[in-house]
Image: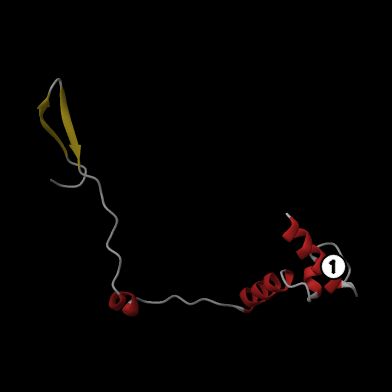
Amino acid sequence: MAFGQVALLPAVGHAALRLTVHRVAPPIPTKVERDISPRVVSSSMSDKADSDNHSNQGNPNNDAYWESRGYDERPDDWEDQVAEDDKDKDDE
C-alpha cells in the first residue's frame, strides 16, 4: 500500500476497519552520512558580539550584568549581593 492510501478491511461485528498508511520519519543519518554532509558556517562579528554580551549579562563580575539590571555599574559590594541572592535561592 502506498502513502496516503486507504484500505477497508473486512467487517468485524458491525463495523468495518479502516487502515491508512501514514508517512514515517526519515531515517536518522549514519555517522558517515553526517560526516560527508555539507556544513553551513556563517559567523560575523555581530554574532560574536551578541554572544559575548549575552554571556556578560549572566556573569555578576561583569558590568553588563549589573547594567542589564538597572545599575549604572557593578557595585563595590557585588560579591555580597550575589551571595545574598544565592542564599535566598537556597532558602526557597
- Residue 40 in percent (x, y) is at 44, 75
- Residue 48 in percent (x, y) is at 63, 77
Q: Quadrant of residue 78?
A: bottom right
- In the image, 45: left or right of 25? right
Whether residue 74 appears in this view of the structure is no
- For the residue marked with disc 1, what is the amino acid? Gln
Q: Is 64 above or below relative to 16?
A: below
Q: Is 22 above or below relative to 11?
A: below
Q: Quadrant of residue 86?
A: bottom right
Whether residue 27 appears in this view of the structure is yes
Is the residue marked by circle 1 packed among few (<14), some (14-19), or many (20+) residues within 10 Å? few
Determine the residue positioned at 52% across, 76% down: 42
User: Where, quadrant-wise, is the N terminus in this rendering?
Assistant: top left
Residue extending farthest to the left is 10
Q: Secondary structure at mark 1?
A: helix
Q: Is 41 above or below relative to 21?
A: below
Q: Quadrant of residue 57?
A: bottom right
In the image, 15 versus 1, the foreground residue is 15
> Residue tagged by mark 1?
81
Q: Is 63 above or below relative to 17?
A: below
User: Where, quadrant-wise, is the C terminus in this rendering?
Assistant: bottom right
Determine the residue positioned at 61% across, 74% down: 47
- In the image, 9: left or right of 64? left
- Residue 45 in percent (x, y) is at 63, 79
In the image, 69 versus 46, the foreground residue is 69
Residue extending farthest to the front is 91
Determine the residue positioned at 81% across, 62% down: 69
- Residue 88 in percent (x, y) is at 78, 59
